[in-house]
Amino acid sequence: GLYGNKSLSSGESRHPPRSGQFRTLLLTLMLTLCQQALALRCGPPMLSTARPTPEPAAAAAADGGAVLQGEAAKQWLAERGIVRHDMAPQDHDRAGYRSEPVRPKVGGDMPDGPRPGWFHVPAPGGSETRYAELKESLEARRADAGGTKLATVCEEAQCPNIGECWNGGTATIMLLGDTCTRGCKFCAVKTDAAPEPPDETEPWNTADAVANWGVDYIVLTSVDRDDLPDGGAGHFAQTVGLLKFRRPELRVECLVSDFAGDAAAVRTLARSGLDVFAHNVETVERLQPMVRDRRASYAQSLAVLRTAKDFGNCDGRRVYTKTSIMLGLGETAEEVLRTMRDLREADVDVLTFGQYLRPTERHLAVVEYVTPEQFDYFRREGEAMGFRYVASGPLVRSSYKAGELFLAAMMDEDDERDAEQQQQQQQRGGEVEERALGRRSSDNLDNRTPAAAAAEAREQRPQPQWNPELSVKAQ
């Protein structure tokens, strides 16, 4: 049945009843071949990349003039060879991760018992720590601004990693206000269809404050602002430019929305001088409608990440792309692995995994608490797939230790390697030019007579500067 060979189904007419042992042997051989065929499969098959004739909007998206939404986003991905992978019907043990999909619900049952012990972290603080210095600087800045609040996501979200990140020289600033135009079922940020207009002085205030903090890595993020023509991309780009002007060595990451699929907005930010373009796909494809706002989509997020990489890597610049996935919402191991493969197809560099935690009872319930061993399994799989850096753990968040260890070190290493390669190319080019000049010089000397060489030398001598007044008196 697996091979669709009808001749095998007519075995009874070709084999008499006394050949029962032969039929058993034949069926056993067939079963063995089927098992071997399944074992040799190197991953789930790919969806067909065949798509209808490109619409004008989708065709123009590559030039940053269209919106990458819905079918246009899927078509845009397919035209660039970025295919989304089907799940394989496998049921292997993935570090004990679930194999049966579950649909999360608002008001659903939470896991039994208290939260596991791995959610406990040491309290931040200490009078001589970098955390204390940054907190004092923030409070002083707010006092000097007459109450104008420079918001950090670390404080607003009461992130458990605030001490570790601030002590490590990393902070996350929230731009464009605290009111979001979307209503995702996992997020407790305040929502409104018409938030307050952005503060036009915010880019300057942010650059002034960060320049005095002494941090090595800053993450800029914001709520979704669908009410703005460019989704806030210009506001971000201006802030990045001012930060780089004040401190060129500062590493800047922007964790942004999908800009409603506007490729021009993505291009504006990707070419602003930032180091890392981050946009979270949040969850696996099946759970997108249940977890995210209806204006977001899986294909649109993949297209935004790929567009940012294409636009950012030009004119000798390099932009890294990054995304994050929440676990514990009822996804299966195969769905997670499929999402990871899709992200690699979109050339995403950095991937983070974290545990979903319900902010209030009005949000999606946690389906399960994922163990550290299961997080480590996905870290190993991600590294094997080719991600440059994978952070995976129950308390990992999108900007968790963003400037620490691998990410900042990776960028520094790439910069050093680029500088060495450029220097080597210049040296090779100089040697070739010197050899060429040497050959031309020797050819000229060989072809000239001594008299011609002497005449050329005389012509190259500096000529005396005659004074007209002296020449007149001499006459």
Image (cartoon, rainbow, N blue to C red):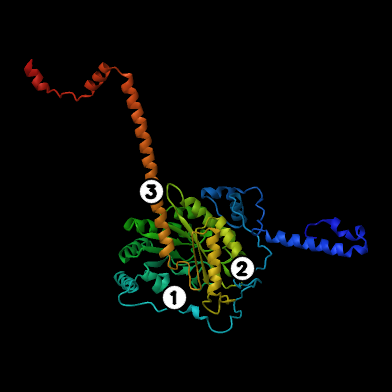
Q: Is residue 198 visible?
A: no
Instruction: Provide residue 209's location: percent of width, then percent of height.
Output: 33, 65
For the residue carrying disc 3, how many other residues have a C-alpha within 10 Å: few (<14), some (14-19), or many (20+)? few
Is 437 drawn above or below residue 340 in the view shown? above
Instruction: Provide residue 379's location: percent of width, then percent of height.
Output: 53, 66
| Disc 3 from disc 2: Cα separation | 42 Å
Is 214 drawn above or below residue 356 in the view shown? above
Name the image quarter holding residue 300: bottom right
Give the residue pinned by disc 3. 420
| Circle 2: residue type | Ala
Instruction: Provide residue 334's location: percent of width, then percent of height.
Output: 63, 66
The residue shown at (15%, 24%) is 465
Question: Helix, strand, or loop for circle 1?
Answer: loop
Give the residue pinned by disc 2. 333
| Circle 1: residue type | Pro
The residue shown at (61%, 81%) is 109
Proximity of marks 1 and 2: CB atoms separated by less than 8 Å: no
Considering depth in this image, is 272 or 450 the residue closer to the camera? 450
- Given this view, does label 1 or label 2 mark the residue nearer the observer? 2
Name the image quarter holding residue 163: bottom left
Give the residue pinned by disc 1. 160
Lower sequence index among marks 3 and 2: 2
